[in-house]
Amino acid sequence: MERRELTITNRLGLHARAAAKLVSLCSRFSSRVVLFANGRRAEGRQFIALLMLSAAMGAQVSIEVSGPDEHMAIVAVTRLIGSGFDEA
């Protein structure tokens, strides 16, 4: 199991489009991806659960990944969140 702490940097936070990108990315891996923010927990493949995290700009998010391709998954999720979900 790998775990990382990140900060949401994009202006709109983890909104619908960003959550959709995250679900799409997490679905590519067989590992289980779980995000924690604001005292809540969400599976990386569950769109509504990700929105319920209410992770605005500046929110601290913990990512926990476990499974056969966990390292590749956590690197990809870290890149996506670190890039501000590729938003301008």
Image (spheres, helix red, strand yellow):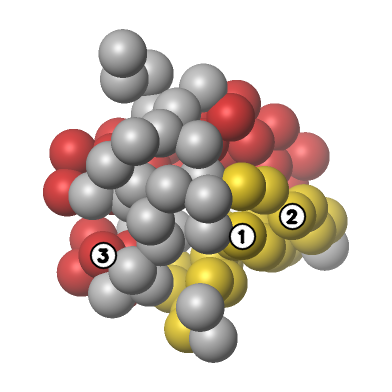
| Residue at (51, 78) in percent of width and height | 38
Label 2 and label 1: CA atoms lie apart by 7 Å
Secondary structure category for the residue under label 2 = strand
Q: Name the residue under label 2.
A: 5
Residue plotted at (50% across, 36% down): 9
Crowding at dot 3, Cα within 10 Å, few <14 / some 14-19 / many 20+, comes out as: some
For the residues labelled 3 and 2, the Cα–Cα distance comes to 18 Å
Mark 3 vs mark 2: which is more N-terminal? 2
Q: What residue type is labelled 2?
A: Glu
* Quarter of the image where the C terminus is located: top left
Q: Which of marks 2 and 1 is nearer the N terminus?
A: 2
Q: In the image, what residue type sits under mark 1?
A: Gln
Q: Dot 1 corresponds to which residue?
A: 60
Image marks 3 and 2: residues in contact by CB distance under 8 Å = no
Task: Tell me the quarter of the image containing the N terminus.
Answer: bottom right
Rendered location of residue 35, percent (x, y): 54, 65
